[in-house]
Amino acid sequence: LQTADMAIQAALTGHLVFSTLHTNDAPSAVTRLMELGVPSYLINATLLGVLAQRLVRTLCKQCRQEDENGSRAALDEVVKPWKISGSYKPFKPVGCVDCRMTGFMGRMGLYELLTVSEAFKDKVTQSPSIDSLRRQAVTDGMRPLRLAGALRVAEGVTVLEEVLSATPPLD
């Protein structure tokens, strides 16, 4: 609580404060601050936004192969709530000398940016559930981590299994 209190006091006096919290996604940062004892009115007065990130392995460009039948239906299910359509080519890992037979080479970040709107602040004052905060953040334009990952799968950069294991489920 002492560190959270110091950060809030600095923000109240006009300082731009950057901090880290261990949460599953961006909206969970609000509930974590509440768990740390920060009152909702202080959260509303000081919080401008929250950026969440997760790392996923990227497919090896030397050996990846198009996944003809595997993840297309599952990927369609993940992106369905956002009515995203278009052509895409999911790939699968194979393994070669370059990637040491893993099928993966390197990692990339998936990001979720929550910008605090007046409607979001209204939710915060109501002692919200995390689901309520998440819904409001998405309504305000936040692209969830899982959707960001699904878009990388559609681009052929990673696989759906990586995204599903690294990101919280969508409601």
Image (cartoon, rainbow, N blue to C red):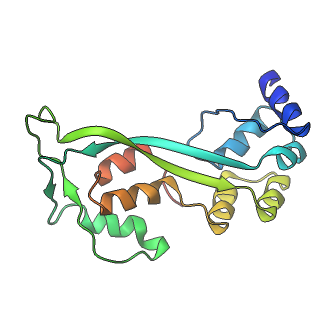
Q: How many marks?
A: 0
Residue 36 in the image, given as x and y percentages of width and height = 77, 31
Residue 109 in the image, given as x and y percentages of width and height = 43, 44
Residue occupying image coordinates x 36% and y 57% = 152
Tell which of 71 and 59 is nearer to you.
59
Q: Is residue 77 left or right of residue 119?
A: left
Residue occupying image coordinates x 16% and y 61% = 67
Q: Is residue 112 left or right of residue 16?
A: left
> For the N terminus, which image quadrant?
top right
Tell which of 106 and 167 is nearer to you.
106
- Tell which residue pokes out farthest to the left in this image: 97
Q: Is residue 136 left or right of residue 62?
A: right
Tell which of 60 and 145 is nearer to you.
60
- Tell which residue pokes out farthest to the front in this image: 15
Q: Is residue 59 above or below residue 148?
A: above
Residue occupying image coordinates x 76% and y 35% = 17
Q: Is residue 78 above or below residue 128?
A: below
Residue 78 in the image, given as x and y percentages of width and height = 40, 64
